[in-house]
Image (spheres, helix red, strand yellow):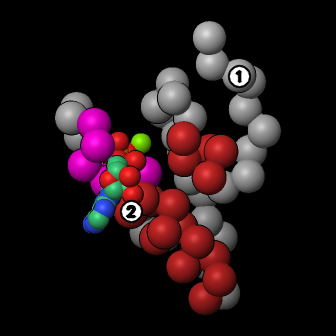
Amino acid sequence: MLTVLFLSGKGGVGRTLIITSLATALAMRGGYRVWVVDLDPNATASRVLGVNTPKQR
Ligand SMILES: Nc1ncnc2c1ncn2[C@@H]1O[C@H](COP(=O)(O)OP(=O)(O)O)[C@@H](O)[C@H]1O
Ligand SMILES: [Mg+2]
């Protein structure tokens, strides 16, 4: 099992881009079951990956 944690207090540094790209690439390559845990209240990564998240206020 491979665990990748991308943590940064600063925003706009490419967290969402890197995690969603890496997850998509591994999933498309096959042989991997990929689990993305999105702890950001903005839920951008979840939306990018197709999760229907509640609207932000
Ligand atoms: N390596 C990169 N080169 C060019 N633009 C990038 C790169 N990484 C991120 N960006 C752009 O910077 C912005 C913020 O990226 P994002 O992944 O949403 O950051 P974070 O999740 O850390 O807030 C987005 O518009 C994204 O397209
Ligand atoms: Mg983000």
| Vertical arrangement, residue 2 with respect to residue 5, above or below | below
* Res 31 seen here: no
State the residue position of label 1.
55
Quick check: is 1 in the magenta stretch? no
Q: How many C-alpha atoms fall within 10 Å of the one at disc 2: few (<14), some, or many (≥20)?
A: few
Q: How many C-alpha atoms fall within 10 Å of the one at disc 1: few (<14), some, or many (≥20)?
A: few
Residue most extreme to the right: 52
Segment colored magenta: 11-16
Callout count:
2
Task: Characterize the magenta stretch by its predominant secondary structure.
Answer: loop
State the residue position of label 2.
18
Residue most extreme to the top: 57
State whether label 2 is within 8 Å of ligand 1. yes
Which mark's residue is nearer the viewer, 1 or 2? 1
Tag 1 secondary structure: loop
- Taking the image as shown, residue 15 lies to the left or right of residue 41, namely left
Report x, y in % for residue 5: 34, 52
Type of amino acid at the residue the image marks with label 2: Ile
* Res 21 seen here: yes
Q: Quadrant of residue 18?
A: bottom left
Q: Quadrant of residue 52?
A: top right
Tag 2 secondary structure: helix
